[in-house]
Every structure is written in C-alpha cells, then in structure tokens.
Amino acid sequence: MDVARIVRTQISTAELNPPQELVDGVNNGQVGLLEIVKALGEYLTSTEDEVRLKGLTFLSNTLKIVNPTKINRQATQTLIKFYLSKLDDFDSLPPALGGLTVLSKLSTFDDDAAIEVYKGVVENVNMKAYIQATRHMVYVLFDSLLATHRSALKSMGTSFLNSYTKMVDGEKDPRNLMLLFSIDRVILLEFDVKDHIEDFFDITFCYFPITFRPPPNDPYGITADDLKLALRACMASSPYFARMAIPLFLEKFATLTGPSMKDLQLSIAACLPVYGAEAVRERAGELWEGIKTEILYSSDTSIEAAALSALESLIRTLYPTDQSPAGLAQDIIKECLEILNEPDKTQAVAATKILADIFRSSPSAGKFALSQAFPQLFRQFNSPSVPSHRAPILSTISSLLLAAQSVYTSPDSQRTSRQEQSLEPYLQGILDVLREGLRTDGLKLPALQGCTACVQIPGLWAKEDVEDVVRGLDDILINDEDPEIRLEVVKALTTFSSTHPTIIESLTLPLLFHNLPESAPTSEDHISRDKYRSILSSLQELCVQTALFQTLVIRMTTKLDLLSSTKDSDVNMGKTSNFDDRECSIAYSWDLLHTLQGVINTKIKEKHGDLIRYFDQLVPRLISLVVADIAKGGIYRDRRLIGLIAKIIENLVWELSAEHQSKWIQAMYAAYEQGHWDKVVHDKSKSLCASPFRTGATSHEQDLVALYSASIQGMKADVSLPFSSMTEYLSSKMHWTINVAQDQWQTQWALDMICAFVNKREPDLRDSLETTLENVWSKEVQDTAKELKHMQRGLSVYLYIIKALALLRQPLAYSASERVIDILSLSNLDPDFVAYAASGFSILAQGKGKSHLTAKLLFAQKLWNFVLPRLIEGDKDASGTGRLVYLVAFASLLPLVPASLCLADLNTILPLILRSLSLPDPQQRSNAIIALTSILETATDSKEVDKAIHSHAETMVDSLLTSAIKQDGIPTSAKVRSISLSCLAIFPDVIRFENLHKHKAIVIKQLGKALDDPLRNVRKEAVECRAKWYRYGNAV
C-alpha cells in the first residue's frame, strides 16, 4: 500500500478523514502508525499554518478511527512527545488536544505520561486566548486524565490543585461549565482539598445563583436547571465549604427572589447534610429565619416546597439520632403551635406543613413534635373557641398522620411505627376525633384522609378499631348524598381493602349488596335509581381487589338471575307502565353488567392473575341467562344486554391460555354448529337443543351470534380449532351473513366474526383466500340481478376481509381494494350501490381500534398510500356529481391515519378535506373536521405547511361556521357542531391575524347563534370559541 500517495491525496483534496483503505491497513497490521506519521512529515513540519493544521488534523482523525490495540507503547510515547511539542502552536492546539485525548484512553498510556501531558497543557496553554471549542477540548482531556489516571494526578498534590483552579478560573460558557462542574465534583470528593478549599470555593460558588437563560432554539439543549443541578452537586461535595458557604447563603436570603430563591433553598437542602451538624448548629437559627419566611409568606408554591426541603435537611442534620431534641427544634415546634391557636388563619396551614416536615426529618424531633401537637390539637378540637375551627384542626391532625404514614410505609425508610412508638400514646384520641369527623358534616373529608393514613401504617390499629372505622365509612357511603364525599369514601375503602380485605368483605360488601334493590326501580323513582348506581360505582372501585372479586361475581350473578324473571309475555304492550317496567329491568341489568365489565377491564389492565380462575364460573352463567331468556322471552334476550355480555366474554376469552381457549372454542363450536350446549351453559336444563345457525331458527335465537362472534374475536392466533377445513367454515359464515342474518345488528356481529377469523387464521386460509374473495365479488357483489341489500352485504363481507388482511399488510388486501375503487366510477349506472361502496371505506378506516385483532406496524400508512392516489386519480377523471363518491370515500378513509401523514402531502390533501366539509353526511363531515383539527394542532415549522394553511384559512372558517350552527335543510349532529366549534377555536392560535382580520366580526356574529344551541356541550364550546375570537388580534 502506497501510504505516502494516500496521505498526499487526502491532504491535497482537504479530505482530512483517513480513507477506509488506510484504516483497514492499520487494523490488519499492513501499515504502522509511525509509517503514517513519516508520510505526514512534510505537512506536520510545514511553515505554513494551514498546511500544518491539515497534517495534524489528519493524524488525530486517524487515531480516533483505528483499532486502539494497534497503537503500541512505542508509538504512544512518540505521539505524546510530538503532540506536546505542538501545544504552544496556537493553530495546532485543537488537533493536538484531540490526539492526546485519544492517547490518554489507551492501555499504553501510563501514569507518567498522564503527569507529563497535564503539565504540558497547564504550562503551554493560555486558556483566555482560545475560543470555547478549544477550551472545551482542554477540559475533555482533563476529564479523561482524571477518569483513567486519577491516582497519578493525586500524587502531584498541591501543584495539581493550584494549577487546575487557575486553568478553569473565569470560564463562562454553559457547555464548558457543565463539564467543569462534573470534574470539580470528582476532585472535591476524591482529592485532599482542605488546604485549597478557598480556591475551589472561588471557582464554584462564584456562579451561584445561576441566572442563565438559554437562547431561542438553542441547539445544545442546556437549560438553567441543568446548570443549577450540576453546580449544586459541586457545592454539596465537601464539608470544608461550610464556613464560607453558610454565610453566603444567609447573605443571599435578603437579596434573592423568584427562581433564584428557589435555587437557594434547594441548594441549602443539598448542602447542609454534607456540611454536618457541628458547622450548621452555630448559625441554625439564622438559617431557620430565612427558611421560615418562604414557608409562611411565599405566594409561590414551588418556593414553599423548596423551603420545606431546606427545613427538612436542617432538622435532619441537627437531629440525626434518637436523642432528645433541644434548642432549635423545640423553638420551631413552639412557634408553630402558637400559630395553630388560630387554626383558621392562612399561616396555620404552613405551620402544619412545618410540623409534618419535622416529623419526616428526624425520629427524635418528630416524636417530640407529635407529643406537643396532639394534646393541644385534641383540646382545641373537643372544645373549640369557634365551631368553624374544628375543620382546620382536624385537617392538621390528618396532615400529621399522613406524614407519619409516608415515613412508616416508604420502601426507602428504615423507620417503623412499632420501633418509634410515636403515635401509640395518642391512639385513642386519634380514633375519637376521626370517628367524630366521620359523623359530622364539614369534617368528613379531613377525617377520611386521617383514616386512610392510619390504616396504612402497619400494626397501628387493632382489628376492632378498623372494623369500627369501616362501619362509619359504610354509613357515609349508604346515606350521604354528597357525590364528592362518597367518592372519597370509596377511595378510602379501597385503601382499607388492600390491607384488611376480610373486613371489607364481611362488613362493606354485604351492606352494599343489601342496599341494591331486588327489582328495578320504576321510571319515576329517580332517587332509588341514582342510589343503586352510586352503590354500583362503589362496588366497581372496591372489588378490583383479588379477595373481593369472588364475592362480586357470586353476588352479581345472583342478582342477574333474579332479574331474569321479567318476560315479554308479562308485558301488555298496550299498557305503558308494563313496558316501562321491562325497560327499567333492562336498564338495571345493564348497570349490573356494566359494573362487572368495569371491574374485569380494570383487572385486565392491572394484569391480575386471578381473573381467569373465574372464567368457568362466570361466562357459562352469563350465557345461561341469555339462552334461557331466548326460550322464555325474558329481558336477557334484549340486544343491548346480549351485546354487553358479548363484550365481557370477548375480554375474558382473550385472557385465557391457548389450551383453555381451544377447549372453549370447541365447546362453543359444538353448541352453535351442532346444538350441544351442555359445556357452555351453567344451567343445562335451560339450554337450547339446536343450533342458532340452523334453518328455521327464530330471530331471537339468531341473536346468539353475538356471543359466538365474541369468542372468535377474543381468540388468539395459535389456538387449535375443532374443524379441519378453515375455508369451509369461513364460507358457511359468509353465507349466513349475506343470506340469513335478519338485520344490521346480526350482520355486524357476523362481519366482526369473519374479520377476526380471517385476521387470526390467515396462514391457514392463504391458499384459498383469493378464490374466496373472487367468489364473493362475482357472485354476491357484481350480480346485479340480486337485491341491493344482498349486494351491500356481499360488499361488506368483502371489505371486512380486506380489513383483516390490510392489518397484516398482506398484498391481497391492496389488489382486492382496487376493485372497490374501480366501481366508484359507475355511480351513474347504480348510484345507490356505488354510494354505499364509497362510504364502505369507513370499514377500512376502523383499523385495529380496541379489538383483539392482529396488526402489523405501519399497516395504516401502507393502506393509505395505496388507496389515496387511486382515489385522487379517480376524482380527477370524474366529472360533475361523479366526483362526489370519491370525496365520500376519501372522507370515510380519513380516520385511518394521523395528522402527521396528512402534513407530508398537505397541498394535495387539504383541498380534499375542505371539499369534504360540504358533504351532506354528518359522520363524513366529522371525519374531515377531526382531520383538519389535528392538522392545525400539529402544524410544523415547515414553510410549505404554513403557506397551505394560511392560503385556505378563509375557506376553512366559512365551512366550519356552516357546520357549527344548526340550520334547516342541512343534516347535522351534536358531534359535528361541537368539533366544528373546537376547530374554530384553534384558528386564533395558529393563523396570523392579518389573514383573518376581515372575518373576525363575521365569526363573532355567527357564533352568537351557536350560543342558542339546544345542547349544553355545544353552547359551552361556543362560549369558549367566541372568547378566543374576541381576543384575536388584540394587544396582549
């Protein structure tokens, strides 16, 4: 290899990175580093600064890239000497520093070399003469030497510390300071700096407090907080700083405000434990005065929190042991108790926080604080000077209990209630005031907080005490009409259930279930209905706990069984009261099932392992309810209840193991395909004896398809199925969907089942799917001799199969969807069917949603990128009303993709969205408005996007105003009007005023009409939107 030629070529072309050929030569041993140095000789020694700089840069870049093991000891020593000789060369310093930094990390770079390099830098480099980047390279070299040869630098003793502080003194650049603060901290922790502490104080505390504000669009991303944290770590690195730092802190109390005061308080919190009790005690009183002011009088909660941290640090430093607290702690506690003599004053809240802070800070000071506070607070509570004082007094007691709970239950704390016995002397008094609080209006919320805190402290309350408190909570839950109080009670009971589940199971749950009505309240009995819904809401929160879920399942299924006695045959449709009774029973059952569903969903979200144990207990019972009422005409054949039960079954099936799923699917197959129901129902005497898919099945029997569909939708892809031919099974379900299903409800459940089956079993169906789709298209969709309803169902089946395949990014999905796009051009021949096909793209836009379908990454983008260009092309080729179907298809497909994808081609997509705003269908307009809202909210700094949005701003506003106001002759919905107003409210934040100043008055006038909308939510959006337009363009 001609090294000289390669080097000459690179230098002459100013390409200062070594070519891969040369790097490979060094790494495989063909070329030695010294050979490269020799080839660079004329450049490294050139009298021309630019040529010399190129040679040095090429050498240093080569060292960074080659394998470090190829740099032997001889080469290392030679290169060190060479680079050191260049340190006094102003232009050559940067590449020399880069090369030394690389060398310093090599195993061939020893301690002697580290000392030699360090001395060479400090003796030859005048830091103030160089720019930030060069200074940064010096600090990087120091950091490397400190990391790899710390012992060598330590051996230099005073000379290292003196020279280092001189080198870094006066640095101001934030990028360099971040590195220097980390270096300073290592030196302060690892080196003997006692005799040099003043020098280090000067180079660190001179930056305190930091007031740095990063420039706009700072590419380095260094924030003021980054610098503050790094400096704070330095300030808290050595106890020797105390004698100079504490006076500085005290001085700063008088001059700092805002963020700087917060920084001071947090710095005190970090430093005091390091400085130690002896150094702090001398001026602890002065520190307390500065801290106290910010706790008692600061209007900034963040500064108050920082001051509390400082106080906690002060107390923890002064009282680290169990010895009796004397001096400052006693004075602080006395001062706080004097403030609490007037508990309704603002400062009483701050005094409470101080006492809680003291408890968290020190076992001895905390115990003493409680011993002084509780007796006084109990006296004040029992004999208040003013009745209104009881609430703030109880809040103070609860706050102290919460502080104790946070200490005794923290995983990082070594303190325990059993060991400290700080609360035990006052247990009876605590119980008395909390029980009184639970019985008294206005005191319940603080009492609940105190009860929740106490029950979480291990071993604090005996079982009898917990039972007594739970009875009080239960009484509130049943009898209190305040929803806020009931919500807090439920939260408290939930906490109780985590530590004492048996007590909740034996006391609370029986009471709640006892207060659930045996039958549904009448339609006029709003009070009873609200009461049972409140109880169900409580049960939904409580029974997520493993120990309570079984009770919920048993009691709920029993209640549901009792309600199944309501039959259609009992209802005289001529009598409104009987019809209302049935509807009330359905509503009650729906609420019960919805509660059960809510608990199950929460347990699934929290990954509770006990859920699947109840599958065989719960699901057959739910299916029995439906199957039995199908036969006898009970309320559980109502489709609303069947649909809810189906969703519960789907979620539970999904949680099963593959083996358990196989058994369940086999049982469901036997029931639905063969009429053998004994393995899927709880009460075998009430089961059907035939298949719902059989010829002659009643419409109510066919409604059972929802439960079958739910099981297939919840099925995993690797489940073994009880039939061999997947194609025949799919064909039978398609036939039933197209030819047998009675109405849209049954059809939709069947379509979801087909989609799930194809999606999960695509590998088994792959060879036949193309033929299957061809048959559906040719026989069910294209056959114009069939009724429109039949063709529409065929197309729906076709689209749901496309959806199933598109989620998997299967090529067949795209070729099949092209056929649907092609028929959009036939709107003049069959306008009704083509319009249905156009709106059918909403099926593809559904994506995975909340279903259990399998979806691959970027499936939506791939489908969008395939369909959209073809819709746009078809729209261009069409004319007149023929373009409308393409616009409908586009609007129907919009929910498929996020706004970021629209932004990528906004100039093409935005005009289509604007045209879609005039479509008659409210749902399609909703899609367009939601997409437009997302685009406006996520608009980037791109000039093209900005130009597109501003150029169409007037058109967008006009179209949105039309959709926002209810007008005769224009189809609308509450959703369309609400989201139109929400979108309009974004314009003042996104569009420059000069573009819409002419529209401001028009918009405000038109929005006045929206204030008269019949729906409250729409009126609320109109008020907020108009307020933003009023402020639009006004000086801030």
Image: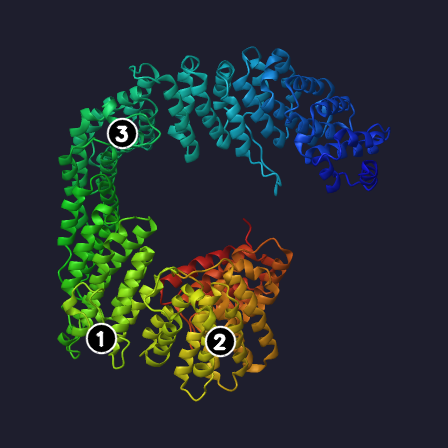
Q: Position of residue 224 (x, y in %)?
A: 55, 34
Q: Name the residue under label 2.
A: 838
The first of marks 3 and 1 along the sequence is: 3
- Residue 690's mark? 1
Let me know if residue 590 appears in the view: yes
What x and y, as percent, mark residue 134? 70, 29
The amino acid type, in three-letter code, at marker 1 is: Ala
Q: Is residue 422 visible?
A: no
| Figure quadrant of the N terminus | top right
Say which residue appears at 52% left-offset and 15% top-offset: 244
Q: Give how far apart the Cα atoms at labels 3 and 2 are.
A: 72 Å
Tell whether 868 sits left or right of 540: right
Q: Position of residue 481 (x, y in %)?
A: 20, 51
Which is more N-terminal, label 1 or label 2?
Answer: 1
* Image spot of residue 990 (x, y percent): 55, 56
Residue 637 is tagged as none
Tell me the residue that label 3 is attached to. 342
Q: Residue furthest bottom?
A: 785
As measured in the structure, the alpha-carbon distance from the residue carrying label 3 to the one carrying label 1 is 78 Å
- Residue 93 relative to residue 258: left or right: right
Task: Determine whether, in the image, residue 758 is placed left or right of residue 115.
Answer: left
**569 versus 293 height, above or below:** below
**SS class of the residue under badge 3?**
loop
Q: How many labels does the image show?
A: 3
